[in-house]
Image (cartoon, rainbow, N blue to C red):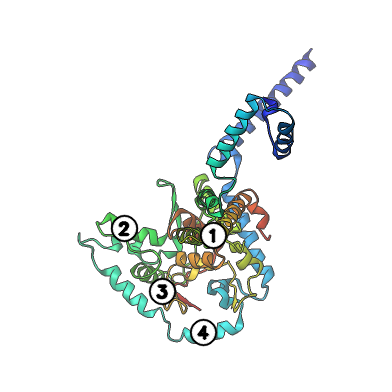
Amino acid sequence: MGLVKLTLKIKSGLILAGLLALSGIASADAGNKAGLDYKAMVQQDVRDFQDYFKKRFSQVEFSEYKNGVYAIDAASREQWLEMEDFPPYEFAVDDGEALFETPFANGKSYADCFANGGESIRQNYPYFDSKKGEVITLELAINNCREANGEKPLAYKNGALAVLSAYMASTSTGNVFAVSVPDEAAYQAYSEGKEFFYSKRGQLNFSCADCHMRVAGQKLRADITSPALGHPTGFPVYRAKWEEMGTLHRRYAGCNKNIRAKPLPAQGRAYRNLEYFQSVMSQGLEVNGPSSRK
Amino acid sequence: MARLHVNKFRLSMMTKVSCEKPMNKVRLLFFIVLSITLFSSGRVFAGAGAGVKPILDDARMTLSKAAAKGFEWTTTHKLIADAETALAGGDKDKSLKLAKAALNEAEKSLMQANYAEAHWQDSIPL
């Protein structure tokens, strides 16, 4: 009988320990739906994405991807370096600084809206605002700041907003991108951006990944396509084709037009989520905006 | 009622029969109603232009579904606009051709959107 009682006690003890262990696991996963570890999933995506380019262009240093196509095409790089002797975005930075320092009608300024007075913060954008439940890009934050201070929002693709963004990026040069996906809602936005990136669209049936992963470094008509890794780091850019500064969402719209897909609104949900995904994929690279492109 | 279900073959047969035997009142009434219906709907002898508007409506509706998913093509809206212009100008054949092309594109863009929703992960080159 004693042996039977001992066996029962051991069994009940094991069951109790098992239940406790399970409850421990459950409580640890309380913040994650169905026990998913979003941060780990995102980090796996980042590793896979960056490894793809490291294998594809094994001779290219990781830090060089911030330079877009100039990281992988020697001939284009040579021309670009010559252009950088007299950077075409220099005036834009000056204009942006002047705008940044001009007070609003209510006496406040852009510096009042941002952490660290708006300096050296580009690497933190875009981020997921859990209260608003949406991705906030730097350009959207600039316009939010204006509207909060009774000013009209600026157009999103070029002009004053692009030069303001250029100035703010210039104060962050060399800082490493630190865009994270902190929770389930952020992961949802990140996933939407990821889905956009890999979805074929337009009459030509191309995805972002088709041009900027599969055939990156190859010619599409007269142009060599840039690697997707590092896409957001240099924006806003002075583009020779535009003959002026433009934002990343302007470039997204241009890419969509190229494949005969109707562009979506700049700073709309879809493009902001795409920028979020691309910025997460580019983590570890330095901010080098504004920059110049062909 | 099943006997009243008519197709071209049966119509011709019934016409032959009617030559041999006097048609009963129900059949005669049916032919009158059928003739009025077909002519009033304009689908029998109508020209190409009459079919354009339903196709354009379909193209617009399908395109709006694709656009709502973010998959509108840059070319489709212009096809619809050109079809409308041709129709307004009285060029029914051109209008019909453009309307059909617009509907075809709209359907393909919607198909693309639905396919992408279900299979976008297949496009990850990792």
Mark 1: give few (<14), some (14-19) or many (20+) Cα within 10 Å.
many
Mark 4: give few (<14), some (14-19) or many (20+) Cα within 10 Å.
few
- Taking depth in this image into account, of B18 and A207 the one nearest to the observer is B18
Disc 3 from disc 4: Cα separation:
18 Å
Name the spot of residue A17 as percent of width and height, x first: 66, 29
Residue A227 falls left or right of residue A290:
right
Disc 1 from disc 2: Cα separation:
34 Å
Contact between labelled residues 1 and 3, with CB atoms less than 8 Å apart: no
> Label 4 belongs to which residue?
A81
Q: Chain of mark 2?
A: A
| Mark 3 or 4, nearer chain start | 4
Disc 3 from disc 1: Cα separation:
27 Å
| Badge 2 amino acid | Cys
Contact between labelled residues 3 and 2, with CB atoms less than 8 Å apart: no
> Label 3 belongs to which residue?
A245
Disc 4 from disc 1: Cα separation:
37 Å
Give the structural element (helix, strand or loop) at label 2: helix
Give the structural element (helix, strand or loop) at label 1: loop
